[in-house]
Amino acid sequence: MPRESQQQKAVRTGNIIAVLRATYPDAHCELNYTNPLELLIATILSAQCTDKRVNIVTKELFAKYRSARDYANADLKALENDVKTTGFFRNKAKNIQACCRALVEKHGSEVPRTMDELTALGGVGRKTANVVLGNAFNINVGVVVDTHVARLSHRLGLTRETTPEKIEEDLQKLVPQDQWCLFSHLLIWHGRRRCLARLPDCPRCEVKDLCPRIGVPRRALEPLNR
Ligand code: SF4
């Protein structure tokens, strides 16, 4: 693909979005939740864990802990046990409790709606805050950059950056703000179904004509070149 201007890249990004929207009209957050608190807890648990596993764990967790106060007052060992199978359970339980104590003490047990307030809660980073703001409140203040978004943004030639913060900055320049939340869902869905980490399915990829396939393993491209 010839070197493209920022404007050409933005147009190409728009075309990628259009194709992915048509491919995944139902793209959405795959964590199960019914309110902002549940999404916040599920997102904390999703670090280094699959959404599928988190959904199994939260089915019982959300039945047992119904409010920020329930987590704040929980016995830490019991909470650790309840989230054990999501991995890094001691840290996650500690973060959930610290975060919920702050919700009770500073926010009337409600999940706040700003990036600054959310990232001031224990164990809540920018990525978690972006997930909560975008999905629970429909507020687009950033782009969620997880492992799929980072990998696909690189392969699609939308960024050369390697840190989530820098990748997010590049994506914010290319994607219209009202589509930031949707955009990460589209890349995550495509990353899970087509552009897999180890071996992307480039020959059958819906956006292959828009993708420079940067850094893609040669064996994934061979069927294309035949
Ligand atoms: S063409 Fe290949 S590298 Fe590009 S998005 Fe599709 S599967 Fe991923």
Image (cartoon, helix red, strand yellow):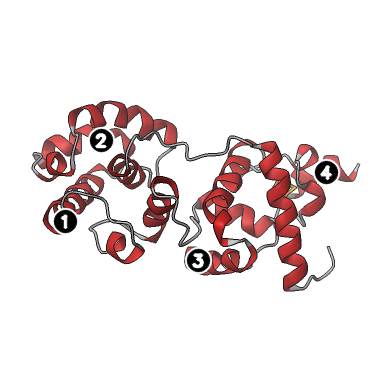
- For badge 2, the amino acid type reads Lys
Tell which circle, 2 or 1, labels the residue nearer the N-terminal end: 2
- Determine which residue is flagged by label 2: 84
- For badge 3, the amino acid type reads Thr
- Alpha carbon separation for disc pair 4 and 3: 30 Å
Ligand 1 within 8 angstroms of badge 3 C-beta: no
Q: Secondary structure at mark 2?
A: helix
Q: Quadrant of the C terminus?
A: top right
- Determine which residue is flagged by label 4: 222
The image quadrant that residue 75 belongs to is top left
- Alpha carbon separation for disc pair 1 and 3: 28 Å
- Determine which residue is flagged by label 1: 102
- Determine which residue is flagged by label 3: 163
- In the rendered image, is residue 162 in sight? no
- Alpha carbon separation for disc pair 2 and 3: 29 Å
- Alpha carbon separation for disc pair 2 and 1: 23 Å
Would residue 123 be found to the left or right of residue 173 on screen?
left
Which percent across, then down, holds residue 218?
76, 49
